[in-house]
Image: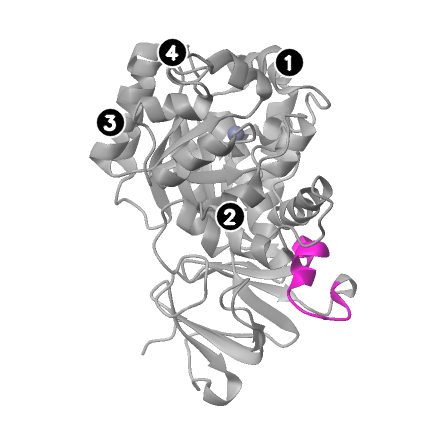
């Protein structure tokens, strides 16, 4: 057994939300995979590199189910607005002026840095010039399900909407099987920006290529009223009627999903990403997460973009989600912390269609793990893993390993020059 990296003397949370903590253990990594974990008495003696994990907790890296990484440029640009005003009066015009390949590349690097430093090791992203997002992720070492955006009006990089599906097809061709960190995909923006023909053609392409299809759906009450018609009485019903729903379709938001919609999603085994902070900030509403989980839907947790959140920190998202879903039913047992730990790791990975084991530290899983400093004041005293949700320990993430490679060590990003990236994004913001 060739061990490339060995983390010793650490506490272990191999399957968040399910298995108990191992108080003193090790993690052995080789060829980008978890080779084995266990208690220190069985720890191998030699490895190419060793990290002393004393005082630290090793757990799987977090999985951000939905993001538009380059939109970090618009963080704070238009706060405290509803979705329609925010999108049509501020974000779409800013995108028309500002989005080009250079902007996408530098902003995706910044977003990747923010996510890695807060413990995220996989992100599902959807935007335009998505090649540049994929390139930035490969360079920074962040794993990415990268989805090329599709719209029925001129979009950045795809001036002629008649060629939007062709652009997605070319993107998939360029990235399928090219880099272990990148899974290409398609992102049809929404039922109100993509017509029936586009949605159908995008799904046909996704099925042909065996890639996931992402779509924002049922985000606002307004969308529900806009899409409603006799044969498809809701946005999710609309997608079902177009034969868009299957286990490789990821429906983002589903805030305005009623019981019938959730039954449709369950019947087709379609996945959901919930983005509670973005939905709350735009006052879109609160997704029926408890009902989704009761039906056994595969659900991931996402931040959405830094323009509507305004953070890409999944620890913060877990904390908010756990509290939000207790308010309306006045039930403190609703959506417990361990459930959020599951959604932010292996549960989210399953929703995105990633391989079995992804988001855990079980042998054979991709070696995506983070080390958390348990000696930080906010984690004292340690009464168990629920603290990881409610004490928001992004600042306690000390080291990050993705695909077996050390990307962050002692809170320092090893793969890119962060000062240069910040300077480039500041320059772009002033243009
Ligand atoms: Zn979104």
Residues at discs 3 and 4 in contact (Cβ within 8 Å): no
| 170 horizontally vs 302: left or right | left
**Numbered mark located on residue 204 in the image:** 3
Q: Residue at horizontal 50%, vertical 55%?
A: 345
Q: Quadrant of the N terminus?
A: bottom left
| Of labels 1 and 4, the one closer to you | 1
Q: Where, by quadrant of the figure, is residue 419 drawn?
A: top right
**Numbered mark located on residue 161 in the image:** none
Q: Is residue 390 magenta?
A: yes
Q: Position of residue 425 (x, y in %)?
A: 60, 31
Q: Which residue is mark 2?
A: 294
Q: Where, by quadrant of the figure, is residue 313 drawn?
A: top right
Looking at the rendering, the stretch of residues picked out in magenta corresponds to 379-396
Q: Earlier in the sequence, mark 1 or mark 4?
A: 1
Residues at discs 1 and 2 in contact (Cβ within 8 Å): no
Q: Where, by quadrant of the figure, is residue 202 drawn?
A: top left
As drawn, 371 above or below 419: below
Q: Position of residue 57 (x, y in %)?
A: 60, 69
**Numbered mark located on residue 85 in the image:** 1
| Of labels 3 and 4, the one closer to you | 3
Can residue 170 be seen in this snapshot?
no
Q: Position of residue 189 (x, y in %)?
A: 44, 23
Residues at discs 2 and 4 in contact (Cβ within 8 Å): no
Secondary structure under the numbered disc 2 in the rendered image:
helix
Q: Quadrant of the C terminus?
A: top right
* CA gap, disc 1 and disc 3: 32 Å
Q: Earlier in the sequence, mark 3 or mark 2?
A: 3
Q: Nearer the viewer, residue 8 or 132?
A: 8
Q: Which residue is mark 4?
A: 159
Secondary structure under the numbered disc 3 in the rendered image:
helix
Q: Residue at horizontal 68%, vertical 44%?
A: 320
């Amino acid at each position: 057994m060739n061990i490339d990296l060995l983390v010793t003397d650490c506490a272990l949370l191999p399957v968040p939300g399910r298995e108990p903590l191992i108080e003193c253990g090790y993690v052995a990594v080789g060829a980008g995979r978890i080779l084995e974990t266990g208690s220190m008495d069985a720890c191998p003696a030699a490895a190419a590199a060793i990290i002393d994990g004393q005082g630290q907790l090793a757990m799987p890296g977090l999985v951000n189910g939905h993001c538009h990484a380059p939109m970090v440029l618009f963080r704070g640009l238009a706060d405290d607005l509803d979705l329609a005003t925010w999108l049509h009066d501020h974000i779409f015009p800013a995108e028309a002026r500002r989005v080009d390949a250079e902007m996408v590349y530098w902003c995706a690097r910044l977003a990747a840095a923010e996510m890695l430093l807060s413990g995220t090791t996989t992100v599902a992203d959807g935007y335009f010039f998505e090649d540049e997002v994929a390139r930035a992720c490969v360079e920074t070492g962040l794993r990415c399900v990268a989805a090329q955006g599709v719209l029925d009006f001129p979009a950045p990089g795809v001036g002629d909407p008649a060629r939007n599906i062709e652009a997605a097809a070319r993107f998939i061709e360029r990235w399928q099987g090219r880099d272990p960190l990148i899974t290409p995909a398609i992102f049809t923006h929404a039922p109100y920006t993509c017509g029936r023909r586009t949605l159908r053609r995008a799904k046909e392409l996704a099925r042909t290529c065996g890639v996931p299809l992402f779509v924002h759906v049922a985000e606002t009450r307004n969308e529900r009223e806009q899409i409603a018609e006799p044969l498809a009485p809701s946005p999710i019903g609309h997608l079902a009627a177009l034969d868009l729903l299957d286990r490789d379709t990821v429906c983002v938001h589903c805030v305005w999903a009623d019981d019938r919609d959730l039954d449709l999603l369950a019947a087709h085994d379609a996945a959901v990403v919930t983005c509670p902070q973005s939905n709350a900030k735009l006052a879109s509403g609160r997704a029926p997460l408890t009902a989704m989980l009761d039906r056994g839907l595969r659900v991931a947790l996402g931040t959405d973009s830094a323009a509507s959140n305004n953070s890409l920190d999944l620890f913060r998202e877990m904390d908010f989600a756990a509290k939000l879903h207790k308010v309306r039913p006045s039930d403190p047992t609703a959506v417990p912390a361990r459930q959020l730990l599951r959604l932010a790791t292996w549960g989210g990975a399953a929703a995105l269609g990633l391989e079995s084991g992804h988001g855990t530290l079980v042998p054979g899983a991709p070696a995506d793990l983070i080390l958390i400093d348990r000696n930080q004041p906010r984690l004292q005293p340690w009464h168990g893993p629920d603290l990881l949700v409610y004490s928001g320990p992004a600042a306690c993430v000390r080291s990050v390993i993705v695909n077996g490679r050390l990307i962050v060590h002692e809170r320092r990003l090893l793969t890119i020059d962060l000062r240069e990236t910040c300077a480039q994004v500041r320059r772009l913001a002033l243009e």
